[in-house]
Amino acid sequence: MNGSFDVNDVLGGASPPWTLLVRRGLHRQCPRCGDGHVFVTRWRLKERCPGCGYLFQREPGFFLGAWFLNFMVLEILHLVLMMAFILWKSGHPKAGLLLPLGVGLVTAVVVPIVLYPWSQSTWAAIDLAMTPLELTEIVEAADALADGEGGPAHPDSD
Ligand SMILES: [Zn+2]
């Protein structure tokens, strides 16, 4: 980038539809521009998108939403597993509880860790769909991009 931009570069056109934003989030991409290089490591989101300068953590505590998404997916998974266990138990009344408890414990630990990167990018997409960028955020993103900031990782990720 040559460091100069006009108003169309700053505004970036109309906001994409929410379905596209969420689809980008589910693919671990920037919801705003679709850039796929928004993670420093598998679990660490960059502070800003290197493609458009979008600041992922828009306010303190922003990633509580990612935690909530993760929790919601896990609870739905546990509900499905519990229903499957109830069906299975009806055909095997003498079956013990060790297997379902073990499966529940392992999924309770592993699933949130594995899904955390997707929950971060998906939550960023949901937030952007619910709260479109304000002009100041758009200008700051363009400034950060012009300054060459991609950012290492958001401060809360350590
Ligand atoms: Zn972007």
Image: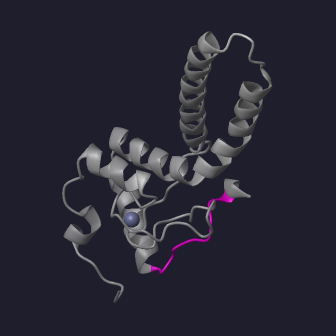
Colour pattern of the rendering: one colour
40 up-or-down from 138: above or below: below
Query: Where residue 105 sits in the image (x, y, percent)?
Result: 76, 33
User: Would residue 145 appear left or right of 101 to someone viewing this image?
Assistant: left
Residue at point 65%, 43% (across, down): 112
Query: Where residue 134 sits in the image (x, y, percent)?
Result: 35, 50
User: Would residue 35 appear left or right of 121 to someone viewing this image?
Assistant: left
Query: Where residue 90 sits in the image (x, y, percent)?
Result: 60, 10
98 up-or-down from 20: above or below: above
Query: Where residue 77 sits in the image (x, y, percent)?
Result: 56, 31
Whether residue 58 is visible here, answered yes or no, is no
> In the image shown, does 3 or 79 lie closer to the viewer?
79
User: Is 68 inside the magenta-drawn segment?
Assistant: no
**Most frequent secondary structure within the magenta stretch:** loop
User: Would residue 43 appear left or right of 149 to someone viewing this image?
Assistant: right
Residue at point 41%, 79% (across, down): 146
Residue at point 31%, 83% (across, down): 4
> In the image shown, does 70 or 17 lie closer to the viewer?
70
Span of residues in magenta: 147-155
**Image quadrant in which the C terminus is located:** bottom right
Residue at point 62%, 65% (across, down): 153
**Image quadrant in which the N terminus is located:** bottom left
Label count reads 0
> In the image shown, does 78 or 3 lie closer to the viewer?
78
Using the rendered view, name the quadrant where residue 44 is placed.
bottom right
82 up-or-down from 13: above or below: above
Taking the image in four quarters, ligand 1 sits in the one at bottom left
